[in-house]
């Protein structure tokens, strides 16, 4: 979120908050992957650099490939125009995201369809073994943070939204998690960035409790 929007939320909260609620309700039937992809397109159309960087990373985390993001922009060329797409690609190049390595993109028409890894439910930990507060868990080659308060749980990805660094288990300090790369601090009651960062939260994972196990959808 920009400094200007932060300012308006402080001085005109009653006017601005309904706008954000409208955007949320307007897309409530979209899955997270589609919603994040559309957010990238709107930021390109508005030529909002900070927003583009934020939602580009979010789109990747929600399962969109770099090829899918580029295809979405090119498909929307009639409304975006080539100049906005070039502007966006210039920013993407400067971000040096490994997903957009040109040597790895566009190689999908040699008789094989590109296989994207679909999300599925994974067992993370037994409920009986999940302590109160914040804990770090590994599951099937992935990691997550679990916040427990009684029988209420929240699950967050361990990937920092800043430079996509994996936040380790020793980064937990009470209810706070600190990314060791640039000291971004996150409140694990809601995943929000509270210090050093630009208001990008940790990615929240969908979870369910099944047969006394905490399971996440990733």
Image (cartoon, rainbow, N blue to C red):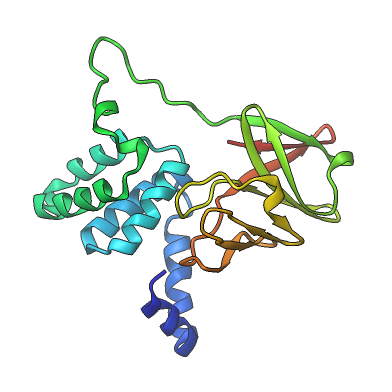
Where's residue 57, x and y in %? Answer: 41, 49
Residue found farthest to the top:
111
Residue 24 lies left or right of residue 81; in this view the side is right
- Foreground: 136 or 132? 136
Instruction: Residue at 71%, 49% (x, y): give it.
Output: 170
Indicate whether 195 appears above or below 13.
above
- Could you tell whether 170 is left or right of 114 in the image? right
Number of residue marks: 0
Camera-side residue of 83 and 72: 83
- Up-down: is 4 above or below 57? below
Q: Residue at x 85, y 35 (%)?
A: 212
User: As drawn, which residue projects farthest toward the bottom?
Assistant: 11
Place of residue 6 in the rendered image (x, y in percent of width and height, measured from the top left): 44, 78
| Relative depth, front residue between 27 and 151 | 151
Q: Quadrant of the C terminus?
A: top right
Question: How far across and how far down the image is residue 23, in percent?
Answer: 42, 64
Residue furthest to the right in view is 128
Q: Quadrant of residue 152?
A: bottom right
Question: Is residue 174 depicted above or below 58 in this figure?
Answer: below
Query: Quarter holding the N terminus?
Result: bottom left
24 relative to 146 in the view: left or right: left
What residue is rendered at 21% in x and 59% in y? Answer: 45
């Amino acid at each position: 979120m920009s400094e200007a929007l932060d300012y308006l939320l402080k001085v005109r909260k009653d006017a601005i908050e309904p706008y954000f609620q409208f955007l949320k309700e307007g897309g409530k039937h979209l899955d997270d992957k589609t919603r994040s992809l559309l957010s990238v397109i709107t930021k390109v159309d508005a030529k909002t650099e900070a927003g583009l960087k934020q939602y580009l990373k979010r789109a990747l985390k929600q399962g969109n490939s770099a090829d899918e993001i580029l295809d979405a922009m090119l498909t929307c060329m009639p409304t975006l125009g080539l100049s906005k797409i070039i502007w966006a690609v210039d920013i993407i190049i400067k971000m040096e995201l490994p997903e957009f390595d040109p040597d790895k993109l566009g190689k999908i028409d040699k008789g094989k369809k590109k296989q994207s890894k679909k999300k599925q439910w994974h067992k993370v930990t037994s409920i009986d073994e999940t302590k109160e507060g914040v804990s770090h868990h590994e599951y099937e080659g992935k990691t997550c943070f679990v916040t427990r308060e009684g029988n209420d749980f929240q699950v967050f990805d361990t990937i920092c939204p800043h430079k996509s660094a994996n936040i380790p288990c020793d980064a937990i300090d009470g209810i706070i998690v600190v990314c060791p790369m640039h000291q971004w601090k996150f409140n694990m009651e809601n995943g929000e960035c509270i210090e050093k960062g630009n208001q990008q939260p940790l990615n929240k994972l969908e979870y369910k409790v099944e047969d006394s196990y905490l399971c996440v959808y990733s």
